[in-house]
Amino acid sequence: MPSPNLYADADLKLSLPHRSWHSFLGFLFPSENDTWLTVFRIGLGLQVTLYAVFLRSDWHYLFASSGKGLVGRELGDAITSFESPLIPKFGWLVAVGRTLNISEETALTLAWVGLLSAGCLLLLGLFSRPAAVAAWFVHLCAAESGGLLAYGADNFMTTALFYLMLSPLPDRYSFDHWVTKAKPKNPQALGFWRRVLQVHLCFVYFIGGLAKFLGSGWWDGSNLWRSLIRPPFNLVSPDLLVQIKYVLPLLGISICLLEVSYPVFIWLKRTRRIWLGCILAMHAAIGLMMGLYLFALVMIVMNIAAFGVPDTRSRAQAA
Amino acid sequence: MLPSKLDTYARKAEIGAAWLLGKEAESSSPLKEAIATYLHAAGIQAGYTFFAPNVPSHHRLTLELFYGDGHVEYESPRVRSRAAALRLNSLLDKLPEKRYEPIREVVLKMLAFSVWREHPDVQRVRATFDAVNLPSITEFEHGKTEKLEPMFSFDFSLRGERQP
């Protein structure tokens, strides 16, 4: 059996482009266990369940056709179809329902039940892959048909569910694994999808932080003030904010620095916990102080799955 | 805030990104449709800003309901849950954007119609859309409150429409 030194010598003999390519592949396909995927699945299961529950009373009103709903689903469907006719939308489900003599109202109810069920199944880890695909599909239909009514949380939910659906499910803490006794998934496939999530978050925060630096309001704290007194995010009394007005510029600049430097300090072992803690605290504050609960939850889930779960396999190998 | 010398490079980068994302292709191009489908499926069709570079203005829609007997009531579109209210707010904040100009009147008519269904005796609805200028901290300390800045308004006559 060749000694490890032989590989090291061979590696040294490789040219710089080859070594760079090997390093790049090593970065893209690290060996990982599936603990992060468990966190991701359970977190998104909770997210999808809450999304369905929160919108229960307005579901038909938001997605019904013209004359029955708030704006009319057809408008969102038409805008989506203009971009590409292949993007999923509720119009498809309603059309399929019509061929089966199912009314629009019943089709929308079934979609809501499907979404709630998918969320619950993800929480349990039962039929993990079909549940992830169903959750992604129905949520995407809702986000596209109600495109005019969508906001940031919808984009992040779509992204997170897209990655979950493609990740090597089921994980070993799921019911699926307990029932089927499936073999452990390829550690490099697990590592790849976690890496995709990590790199995605780095892009998100870097772009967000950079764009904030271009706005004067983040340097003097006025943007924090405006975002916190702006309806419907005005959960905190303005009088309370006035009392801490000297802290707002510092907080504004800190948020910009935290986001723009995320792609650097989240990778360094010494600073990872600090940066992750600060980002999680920021999202928790957004959720509690502005009432953006779903947005806060999806960002917290993505961050914990990407960087919050220690990679036990790597640590074991290092030991 | 960036040096103006960077403008040329920024514009070139913008053109390059638009080409890469198939924005320059014909609307019926299969490549453009494939890219758009992937971007929407992955939830990356829009940029990430998180209230950047600045927090946008807040907007308000007021519907004046004119009854046959001459009296007037004021209403706003309503939803039941807070989660849906966030979405309605998101819709109102999109409407002043230039890219939504072609559908602005249609959307406002739909919103007016949603309120009219609950007030069947209304004959005419005037939808007034305002930008709400929030006070700065200093202005708030001096007792100033929000200021409404009218942006556009539409009159919808509902006499010819039949209630569902």
Image (spheres, helix red, strand yellow):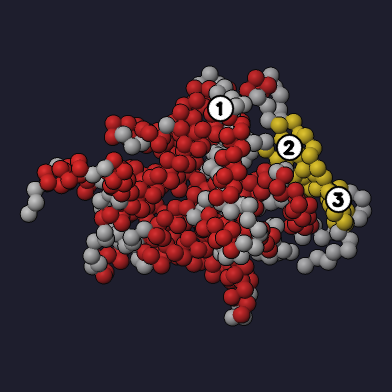
Image spot of residue B157 (x, y percent):
87, 56
Q: Amino acid at mark 3?
A: Asp
What crowding class fits label 3: few (fewer than 14 Cα within 10 Å), some (14-19), or many (20 or more)? Answer: some
Please give the residue where the numbered disc 2 appears in the rendered image: B131
The one nearer the camera, A13 or A45, is A13
Residue type for callout 1: Trp
Real-space CA distance between mark 1 and mark 2, rounded to the nearest whole angstrom: 21 Å
Work out which residue is located at the far right of the displayed protein and give it.
B69
Q: Label 2: few (<14), some or many (≥20) within 10 Å?
A: many
Quarter of the picture containing the N terminus of chain A is bottom left
Q: Check the image and report above or below for B5 versus B115.
A: above
Determine which residue is flagged by label 1. Answer: A218
Q: Which residue is mark 3?
A: B155
In front: mark 1 or mark 3? Answer: 1
> What secondary structure is marked by label 2?
strand
> Could you tell me if the residues under marks 1 and 3 are in contact, i.e. CB atoms within 8 Å?
no
The quarter holding residue B34 reads: bottom right
Chain letter for mark 3, please. B
